[in-house]
């Protein structure tokens, strides 16, 4: 169906994003792209394109992807019975390197460097950071402190995505002047949280999320694998500094003026960084300025437009 649609459109460019998830017959699709010779731009949001199975391997410390995947340490996550990562790796390599005119785009320098070490290194690789909507994510007034009885507390905000243990460990060592607020939990996890953590369900309201970023004194990102998390950008756009584990492209999203990077899994280092940022100079203006200068979605769209037109195919 997709190939039929593209045949009718006859596009000058096919722009790929995430194509994994068993929604697409990769062999048919890439054979079609090769046959037509259409220009391809591929924005990669993770490492899947040059591994046998995984989207990320940072937490595992695996570097088999550089030469040949096999005996995958994460095989059980992707296959119930057989480890086919070597076979799939070879299939991807054959298909993905068959395209004549392709540019790879990475949201982070970290992923761009990895792609350059992979079998995709024959293609030009560019970095275009993720952008965010600065009309939504900006400093906002709210009654969240009063509503959740957080007056007089330093709010430590997190959206854990399953990494609850780091927050519960942090809750054991941080003093009572601080209050951890977690957003995005299900009912079971909310009930399991200790009483000194304010746990809330997921919200789809982006303005409400911007209000939480604005109300917080610091946002902490406990991700162990990520390419360039937009939550880091959204927090800064609302004037709130970010602390992140040193993993993937997450540290690239903050500067010395707008946050801190700490070693992975080091809760004591994170606790120290929280106190430093919350009790030190006001970093709101620096955070807002960084977001406006680097992460304005409209400007990042213009970067893509410039990439589209660079070939000279468009007037």
Image: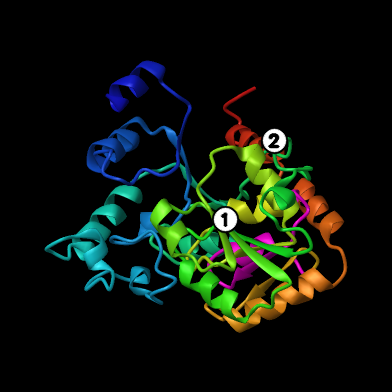
Residue lying furthest top in this view? 8
> Looking at the picture, how far across and down is residue 76, in whole percent?
22, 66
Residue lying furthest left in this view? 81
At horizontal 25% and vertical 71% (from top left) the residue drawn is 72
Task: Report which residue position mark 2 lands on.
Answer: 298
State the SS at label 2. Answer: helix
Name the disc covering residue 284, or none.
none
Q: Can residue 132 be seen in this view?
A: no
Specify the quadrant of the image occupied by residue 85.
bottom left
At horizontal 39% and vertical 56% (from top left) the residue drawn is 188
Left or right: where 91 falls relative to 224: left
Magenta residues span 237-256
* Residue 152 shown in magenta: no
Quadrant in which the N terminus appears: top left
Task: Report which residue position mark 1 lands on.
Answer: 229
> Looking at the picture, how far across and down is residue 118, in whole percent?
41, 64
């Amino acid at each position: 169906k997709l190939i039929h649609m593209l045949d009718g459109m006859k596009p000058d460019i096919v722009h790929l994003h995430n194509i994994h998830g068993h929604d697409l017959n990769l062999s048919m699709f890439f054979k079609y792209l090769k046959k037509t010779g259409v220009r391809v731009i591929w924005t990669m949001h993770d490492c899947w394109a040059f591994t046998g199975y995984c989207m990320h391997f940072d937490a595992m410390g695996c570097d088999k992807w550089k030469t040949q995947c096999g005996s995958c340490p994460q095989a059980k996550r992707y296959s119930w019975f057989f480890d086919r990562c070597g076979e799939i790796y070879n299939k991807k390599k054959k298909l993905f390197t068959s395209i004549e005119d392709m540019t790879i785009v990475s949201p982070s320098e970290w992923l761009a460097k990895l792609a350059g070490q992979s079998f995709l290194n024959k293609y030009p690789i560019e970095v275009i950071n993720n952008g965010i909507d600065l009309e939504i994510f900006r400093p906002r007034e709210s009654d969240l402190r009063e509503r959740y009885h957080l007056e007089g507390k330093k709010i430590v905000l997190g959206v854990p995505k399953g990494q609850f243990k780091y927050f519960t460990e942090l809750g054991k060592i941080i003093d009572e002047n601080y209050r951890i607020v977690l957003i995005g939990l299900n009912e079971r996890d909310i009930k399991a949280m200790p009483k000194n953590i304010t746990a809330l369900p997921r919200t789809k309201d982006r303005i409400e999320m911007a209000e939480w970023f604005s109300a917080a004194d610091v946002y902490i990102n406990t991700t162990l694998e990520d390419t360039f998390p937009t939550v880091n950008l959204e927090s800064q756009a609302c004037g709130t500094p970010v602390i992140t584990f040193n993993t993937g492209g997450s540290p690239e999203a903050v500067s010395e003026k707008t946050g801190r990077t700490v070693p992975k899994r080091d809760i004591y280092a994170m606790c120290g960084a929280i106190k430093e940022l919350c009790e030190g100079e006001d970093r709101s203006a620096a955070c807002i300025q960084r977001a406006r200068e680097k992460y304005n979605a409209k400007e990042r769209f213009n970067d893509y437009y410039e990439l589209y037109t660079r070939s000279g195919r468009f007037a």
